[in-house]
Image (spheres, helix red, strand yellow):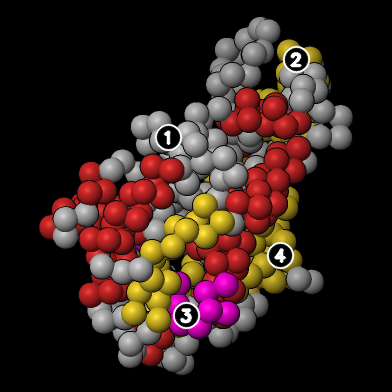
Amino acid sequence: MTDFPGAPDVSDPATAPLGGGRLRVLAAMSGGVDSAVAAARAAEAGHEVTGVHLALSSNPQSFRTGARGCCTLEDSRDARRAADVIGIPFYVWDLAERFREDVIDDFVAEYAAGRTPNPCLRCNEKIKFAALLDKAVALGFDAVCTGHYARILTGPDGVRELHRAVDPAKDQSYVLGVLDTEQLDHAMFPLGDTPKEQVRAEAERRGLAVAKKPDSHDICFIADGDTQGFLEQRLGTAPGEIVDVDGTRLGEHSGAYGFTIGQRKGLRIGHPAADGKPRYVLDISPVDNRVTVGPAEALDVAGLTGIRPRWCGSTPFTAGACTVQLRAHGEPVAATAALVDGELRVELAEPARGIAPGQAVVLYDGTRVVGSATIATTERAVLTH
């Protein structure tokens, strides 16, 4: 039994957003192919489009390395060139201080507390659909357009809903699960109905130089991919013990923040386990600066509790069957969920492996995003003691 409404009537988010008509649209242009094509589609649909690149780094001097990094001078120039080809005005907005406070500082604080955050999700919530949207609305824009792969459809009750993209390999609805109804009312995702290879082909047909530009990946503000080094620069070294589930000391680490639940490589354990099987990080305790490792099966999670729930759509969630996604590129998992005293309690139909506090749990009814919450605690399917 479920409290979720049924399947929506589909409307085209690129040509008829926010009820149709010509809109003033602010297109967030990262300098990549997706945001460029999204802006082009919005302009082609007849909207009055202005491009904006968000300067999120206080020192954007370094250039992109392969597919890593973003927000560099190179990206700003690529975005400007794309706007020129599309024929729309273009500006650069400096949100570096807000990005540092809401995304980077939050990222460091979460790791220091033994949790595993998702900075892309936080950026969508705090920067692209809070700071940027607030500024856009204040300036008279009707909507913010981005190159995210997700769809906004109109439900039977006339309320706009967030849905998965047609291309499951590129679907980004998970990292948009923090958006509330008011933010969705001012959002436009023109790429949600198109596979990625078609987007690149379209960019080439439109004469956009970014058509073959590689996708950025990993954490945008850690261009070299060395998360542990990034955290060590900000948190310093803090030696502690690596122990087995029975408390046996196996090794030493230089900072518990350098580990994530489910990690296997780089554990620096002094000797192999008695059973000869590999060990994985099971728990990170910032209180005693201890990292606990154990067998893979001890990572299985049967349930979890989520805090700070946020809901998409007009019908508040109370309880019911659903599917959940537990990481950005994870598979949907059948579950039952209930809202209890302001917290989301989720029981999984099948155990999921390596789920960490700090990650997001996103609830779905079919393709529709119902809402999300931050994972606070997990319940292990197998006892580790």
Q: Residues within 10 Å of mark 1 (few under 14, many from 20)?
A: some
The residue where tag 3 is placed is 141
Find the distance from the CA under tag 1 to the CA under tag 4. Answer: 37 Å
Dot 1 or dot 4, earlier in sequence: 1
What is the spatial separation of the Cα atoms under label 3 and label 1, in whole angstroms? 32 Å
Between the residue at mark 2 and the residue at mark 3, the CA separation in whole angstroms equals 54 Å
Q: Amino acid at mark 3?
A: Phe
Residue assigned mark 2: 252
Q: Residue at x 47, y 58 (%)?
A: 92
Task: Name the one closer to the observer, 169 or 282.
Answer: 169
| Mark 3, other Cα within 10 Å: few <14 / some 14–19 / many ≥20 | some
Amino acid type of the residue tagged 4 in the rendering: Arg
- Give coordinates of residue 322: x percent, y percent: 52, 68
Q: Earlier in the sequence, mark 2 or mark 4?
A: 2
Mark 3 or 4: the one toward you: 3
**Where is residue 295, by image quadrant?**
top right
- Magenta residues? 135-148
Q: Earlier in the sequence, mark 2 or mark 3?
A: 3
Determine which residue is flagged by label 1: 63
**Residue at screen point 61% across, 22% down:** 279
The numbered disc on residue 308 is 4
